[in-house]
Image (cartoon, rainbow, N blue to C red):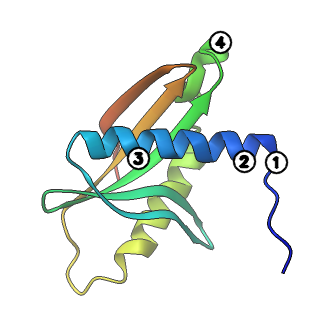
């Protein structure tokens, strides 16, 4: 099998996810899974914060122009993340407490928004 070649944008996305992962680990969260994908969407990072399961959407922009990384999260993207989280939770006999966070990276600045997305979105 040929090695998978990533585009520059995909490499940048992976680097952003790795940066977010290191940041969250540094704040005491435990890594569970990366890039969970299903028919209805993808979750960049799945972490554990104590007993709480945390779904993390990582958004990255080279600069904060045009609203930056946070502004790039559309209502459709939120719906896909929520649906993917619901799909992920189907593997548990009892649903653990959970939340959806966002890590927004604008250039060198990283911002972690805890419980940024409400599941009823």
- Tell me the distance, in whole angstroms, between the alpha carbons under discs 1 and 3: 21 Å
- Vertical relation: 87 (above or below) 14: below
Which quadrant of the rendered structure holds the N terminus? bottom right
- Tell me the distance, in whole angstroms, between the alpha carbons under discs 4 and 2: 21 Å
Identify the residue under disc 2. 10
Judge the density around disc 3: few (<14), some (14-19), many (≥20) Cα neighbours within 10 Å.
many
Tag 2–tag 1 contact (CB < 8 Å): yes
Q: In x, y percent, where is residue 69?
A: 56, 27
Element on which disc 3 rests: helix
Tag 4–tag 2 contact (CB < 8 Å): no
Tag 1–tag 3 contact (CB < 8 Å): no
Q: Residue furthest right?
A: 2
- Tell me the distance, in whole angstroms, between the alpha carbons under discs 4 and 1: 23 Å
Q: Residue at x 20, y 70 (%)?
A: 96
Which numbered disc, 4 or 2, marks the residue closer to the eye? Answer: 2
Which numbered disc, 4 or 1, marks the residue closer to the eye? Answer: 1
Q: Residue at x 32, y 42 (%)?
A: 24
Q: Residue at x 51, y 48 (%)?
A: 78
Identify the residue under disc 3. 21
Identify the residue under disc 1. 7
Tag 3–tag 2 contact (CB < 8 Å): no
- Tell me the distance, in whole angstroms, between the alpha carbons under discs 3 and 2: 16 Å
Q: Nearer the viewer, residue 63 or 99?
A: 63
Left or right side of 40 for 87: left
Identify the residue under disc 4. 65
Element on which disc 4 rests: helix
Which numbered disc, 3 or 2, marks the residue that appears first in the sequence? 2
């Amino acid at each position: 099998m040929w090695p998978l070649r990533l585009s520059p944008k995909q490499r940048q996305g992976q680097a952003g996810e790795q940066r977010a992962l290191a940041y969250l680990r540094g704040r005491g969260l435990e890594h569970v899974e990366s890039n969970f994908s299903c028919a209805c969407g993808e979750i960049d990072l799945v972490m554990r914060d104590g007993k709480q399961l945390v779904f993390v959407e990582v958004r990255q922009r080279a600069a904060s122009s045009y609203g930056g990384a946070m502004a790039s999260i559309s209502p459709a993207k939120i719906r896909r993340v929520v649906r993917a989280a619901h799909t992920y939770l189907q593997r548990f006999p009892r649903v653990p407490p959970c939340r959806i966070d966002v890590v927004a990276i604008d250039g060198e600045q990283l911002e972690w928004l805890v419980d940024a997305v409400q599941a009823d979105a």
